[in-house]
Image (cartoon, helix red, strand yellow):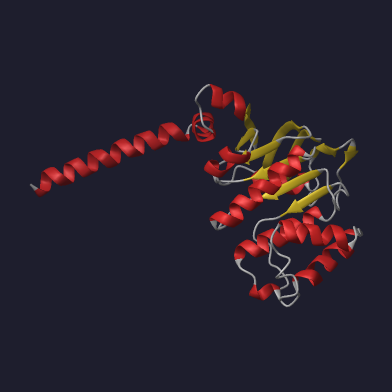
């Protein structure tokens, strides 16, 4: 379980997060969405222990997360530069040493096989595709045998096969009792994997809803997001203006 308790974060006089509270129980996949500048990255960094909150706290399985992270939490960041002159195995050795954890070669080999990286693990990361690098980052997070998994834009830029594989891994992790928080702008992908939708706007949590209930009501995650943020009205006005401009241009042409 992951508990975010009244978390606020300010940089100088600039407040980025305002009293954010949410709970992600075991077995749930919560998609965190929001407009650019909403505070998603800051919240992810607070949850993973990379940034200390100005107020409030984050608790994973009853243990407070502080600076330096949490042994039961796995984190897969977005677009983190990778050491391309290491092989896949060397990168995983480095990750295990960095985290102070050793899980044994059998567990690693099983994960490599599941993520279809077993034939590439002896190659330099420089030869990996974008999707292979993302899978290797996820594998490094899973090597810690975490109970909470935090993913920042995990499906960005992936080919259909890699995206389907990562969705399956995330689903299986939650089904085995893990809690997942994933930050994304891709609401269509979130619809296929998330059980909860969380929406931040201007540093405040403005929506926390159950996806299954929304499906029963015939509402998509995108519908809920557009309604909660008010972006839907803005899009409708822009669309109407665009159609009017086209009509005027057509009349002028005639």
Task: Please state which of residues 135 and 76 is positioned toward the viewer in this rendering.
Answer: 135
Residue found at the far left of this picture: 254
Task: Please state which of residues 50 and 3 is positioned toward the viewer in this rendering.
Answer: 3
The relative height of residue 194 versus residue 98 in the rendered view (above or below) is above
- Residue 167 x/y as whole percent: 64, 47
**Residue 13 appearing in the image:** no
Q: Is residue 49 left or right of residue 43?
A: right
The relative height of residue 171 versus residue 166 in the rendered view (above or below) is above
For the point 61% across and 27% down, the residue is 212
The relative height of residue 115 versus residue 56 in the rendered view (above or below) is below
- Residue 67 x/y as whole percent: 85, 50
Task: Please state which of residues 181 and 7 is positioned toward the viewer in this rendering.
Answer: 181
- Residue 241 x/y as whole percent: 29, 38
Q: How many numbered badges does the structure rendering display?
A: 0
Quadrant of the image containing the N terminus: top right
For the point 64% across and 43% down, the residue is 39
**Residue 30 appearing in the image:** yes
For the point 15% across and 45% down, the residue is 250
For the point 81% across and 65% down, the residue is 92
- Residue 116 x/y as whole percent: 69, 61
């Amino acid at each position: 379980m992951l508990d975010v308790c009244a978390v606020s974060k300010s940089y100088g006089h600039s407040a980025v997060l305002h009293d954010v509270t949410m709970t992600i129980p075991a077995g749930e996949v919560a998609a965190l969405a929001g407009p650019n500048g909403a505070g998603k990255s800051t919240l992810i960094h607070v949850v993973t222990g990379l940034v200390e909150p100005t107020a409030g706290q984050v608790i994973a399985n009853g243990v407070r997360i502080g600076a330096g992270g949490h042994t039961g939490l796995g984190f897969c960041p977005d677009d983190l530069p990778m050491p391309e002159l290491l092989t896949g195995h060397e990168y995983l050795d480095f990750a295990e040493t960095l985290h102070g954890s050793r899980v044994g070669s059998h567990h690693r080999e099983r994960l490599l096989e599941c993520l279809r990286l077993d034939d590439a693990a002896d190659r330099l990361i420089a030869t990996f595709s974008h999707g292979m690098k993302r899978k290797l980052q996820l594998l490094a997070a899973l090597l810690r045998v975490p109970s909470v998994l935090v993913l920042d834009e995990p499906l960005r830029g992936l080919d259909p096969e890699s995206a389907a594989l990562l969705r399956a891994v995330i689903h299986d992790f939650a089904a085995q009792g893990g809690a997942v928080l994933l930050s994304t702008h891709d609401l269509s992908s979130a619809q296929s994997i998330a059980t909860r939708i969380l929406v931040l706007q201007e540093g405040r949590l403005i929506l926390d809803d159950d996806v299954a209930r929304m499906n029963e009501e015939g509402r998509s995650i995108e519908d809920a997001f557009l309604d909660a943020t008010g972006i839907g009205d803005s899009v409708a006005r822009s669309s109407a203006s665009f159609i009017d401009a086209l009509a005027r241009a057509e009349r002028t042409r005639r």
